[in-house]
Image: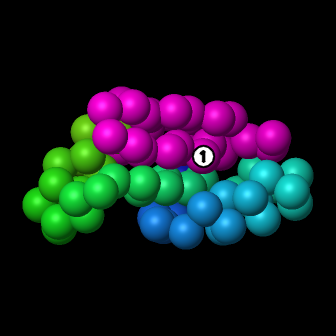
Amino acid sequence: MNYIQPRSLTHDLGFAELLAASGGKSPSVIIFRLRNMHLDRVNICLNMIMDMHVEAFEKGIIISVDEGLIRVRHLPI
């Protein structure tokens, strides 16, 4: 049975800070820090990120999406 790691999308930096402080490996988190949070733009970024980091999501990651920059941190931090 394949287990799919839970994932969270947020615009709140506090969520990732709590996850990092917990020392946990789950859920994987994508933090959007874009000035333009229009749905079409977010969906384009989300699809690109999900395709690029499929395996890492299964292990646990925090991804921060800024204007022109994507940072990836592996959990636990």
Relative horizontal placement of residue 39, taking residue 3 as reference (left or right): left
Magenta stretch bounds: 50-77
Q: Residue at x 87, y 60 (%)?
A: 22
Q: How many marks?
A: 1
Query: Amino acid type of disc 1?
Result: Ile
Residue lying furthest left: 40
Q: Residue at x 62, y 43 (%)?
A: 61
Note whether residue 61 is visible.
yes
- Colouring rule applied to residues: rainbow
Relative horizontal placement of residue 59, taking residue 41 as reference (left or right): right
Quarter of the rendering containing residue 24: bottom right
Q: Residue at x 42, y 54 (%)?
A: 33
60 in the magenta segment: yes
Q: 55 or 18, which is in the foreground?
A: 18
Question: Residue 37: x percent and y percent?
Answer: 25, 64
Quarter of the rendering containing residue 59: top right
Q: Residue at x 55, y 68 (%)?
A: 12
Q: 7 or 22, which is in the foreground?
A: 22
Question: Residue 2: x percent and y percent?
Answer: 54, 53
Note whether residue 4 is visible.
no
Quarter of the rendering containing residue 13: bottom right
15 above or below 70? below
Question: Residue 1: x percent and y percent?
Answer: 57, 56
Number of other residues with Cα within 10 Å of mark 1, as a class: few under 14, some 14 to 19, many 20 or more: many
Relative horizontal placement of residue 77, taking residue 46 as reference (left or right): right
Q: Identify the residue under disc 1.
A: 62
**Local secondary structure at mark 1:** strand
The C terminus sits in image quarter: top right
3 in the magenta segment: no
